Image: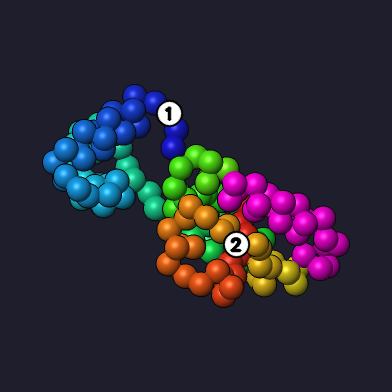
Amino acid sequence: VRSNDRTRRFYKFWYDSKDRFPGVKEQDVLNSIKFEPFLNDIGLQIKLLDTDHFGGICQPIKDLKVGCTMHAICCIGLESKIQALTVILQDWKRFSSAPAESRSNLSTSFAWKPHRTGCWYVRARDISDWRMHLCF
């Protein structure tokens, strides 16, 4: 997202719209408002991004070679997010320090250490079976 008048107005509209949808998560509010005429009125277009390039603690991607961003949205609280992303960064360093020929084979099978506390996904699954792919 580029910061400009349109995006600032959109984010304010999104934030203010949560009052129209009490008890609804932010993503669901966005899904409810993304086709409202206000977006056309301010000249804003929403484009969906290819999820192959983005991943998170709770949403693995398939191939490290194409991933570019990692988030910790599903982790509860800043401390938990930092802890989870720190573990991921350590594993990313381990992956990226491997020889190039090894990285090619690892990119679709690389598993990193699970984050053990504070994330919705971890609470819902058995950690011993939790294998995910890193995306950076």
| Mark sitting earlier along the chain (1/2) | 1
**Disc number at residue 20?**
none
Percent position (x, y) of residue 47? Answer: 38, 49
126 up-or-down from 117: above or below: below
User: What segment carries the magenta color?
Assistant: 83-103
Q: Which residue is drawn at 65% across and 47% down?
A: 86
Does 113 lie within the magenta span?
A: no
Percent position (x, y) of residue 132? Answer: 58, 67
Percent position (x, y) of residue 49? Answer: 45, 53
Q: Which residue is drawn at 45% across and 33% down?
A: 2
Q: Residue at x 20, y 48 (%)?
A: 23
Q: Say which amino acid is labelled 2.
A: Pro
Front-lying residue, 34 or 60: 60
What is the spatial separation of the Cα atoms under label 1 and label 2, in whole angstroms? 34 Å
Residue 117 visible to an observer of this rendering = yes
1 up-or-down from 110: above or below: above
Label 2: which residue? Answer: 114
4 up-or-down from 33: above or below: above
Residue 43 visible to an observer of this rendering = no
Percent position (x, y) of residue 10? Answer: 29, 34
Element at label 2: loop
Front-lying residue, 7 or 130: 130
Few, some or many residues within 10 Å of mark 2 (<14, 14–19, 20+): some
Does 98 lie within the magenta span?
A: yes
Looking at the image, residue 12 sits to the left or right of residue 117; the answer is: left
Front-lying residue, 43 or 61: 61
Label 1: which residue? Answer: 3
